[in-house]
């Protein structure tokens, strides 16, 4: 099952659509186009000097599995944590803006909308990964379990 399908089943895509006041198809299309960049950024981060333990530490420090719960909560998502994740995996706002611009050109979805989707999706992905790596508590204890989850996601994306 793809990450997009997992997030759809978790309710994250529906929650994002409601929060951004867009239809579910637009949310699915935008998420499907943004997810490869988010996962690739996580993969590059894990290969960098801080390694996957550094990424797991950032995700855990921001709330681990609670990040997904924040997206699913029904109220407005506090996107500062999502922006922190994006800053860690992309290195800066210019890269996030570039991702939104490229995805907009491909999908026809408004770039400003995609910029709003990015931190919500980053939180959903990180929270989902932390829940899978950390079990019921949703706290990833380090890079090992999170690395396995990230590896399977990256493998699943490249297998499409």
Image: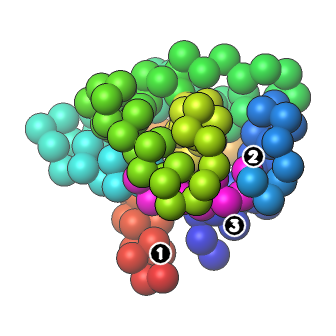
x 54%, y 16%: residue: 80
Vertical position of residue 88 compared to residue 128: above or below: above
Q: Quadrant of the N terminus?
A: bottom right
**Res. 74 mark:** none
Q: Position of residue 72 (x, y in %)?
A: 79, 36
Residue of label 1: 156
- Residue 135 in view (yes/no): no
Q: Relative to 46, is 70 on the left or the right?
A: right
Q: Position of residue 6 (x, y in %)?
A: 68, 62
Residue of label 2: 12
Q: Earlier in the sequence, mark 1 or mark 2?
A: 2
Helix, strand or loop at mark 2: helix
Q: Which residues are magenta?
A: 27-37
Q: Earlier in the sequence, mark 2 or mark 3?
A: 3
Q: Position of residue 84 (x, y in %)?
A: 43, 22
Vertical position of residue 104 compared to residue 126: above or below: below
Q: Which residue ends up furthest to the left in the rendered image?
A: 49
**Distance between the Cα atoms at labels 2 and 3?**
10 Å
x 81%, y 31%: residue: 19
Q: Is residue 62 magenta?
A: no
What is the crowding at mark 1: few (fewer than 14 residues within 10 Å), some, or many (at least 20)? few
Q: Are marks 2 and 3 in contact (CB under 8 Å)?
A: no
Q: Is residue 35 magenta?
A: yes
Residue of label 3: 5
Q: Position of residue 141 (x, y in %)?
A: 43, 37
- Residue 157 in view (yes/no): yes
**Distance between the Cα atoms at labels 1 and 2?**
19 Å
Q: How many marks?
A: 3
């Amino acid at each position: 099952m793809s990450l997009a399908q997992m997030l759809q089943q978790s309710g994250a895509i529906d929650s994002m659509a409601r929060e951004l006041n867009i239809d579910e198809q637009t949310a699915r299309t935008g998420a499907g186009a943004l997810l490869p960049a988010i996962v690739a950024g996580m993969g590059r981060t894990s290969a960098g000097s801080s390694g996957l333990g550094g990424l797991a530490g950032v995700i855990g420090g921001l709330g681990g599995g609670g990040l997904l719960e924040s997206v699913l909560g029904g109220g407005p998502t506090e996107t500062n944590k999502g922006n922190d994740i994006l800053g860690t995996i992309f290195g800066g706002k210019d890269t996030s803006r570039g991702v939104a611009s490229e995805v907009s050109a491909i999908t026809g979805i408004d770039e400003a909308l995609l910029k709003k989707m990015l931190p919500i999706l980053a939180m959903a992905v990180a929270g989902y990964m932390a829940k899978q790596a950390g079990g019921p508590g949703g706290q990833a204890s380090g890079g090992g379990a999170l690395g396995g989850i990230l590896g399977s996601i990256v493998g699943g994306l490249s297998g499409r």
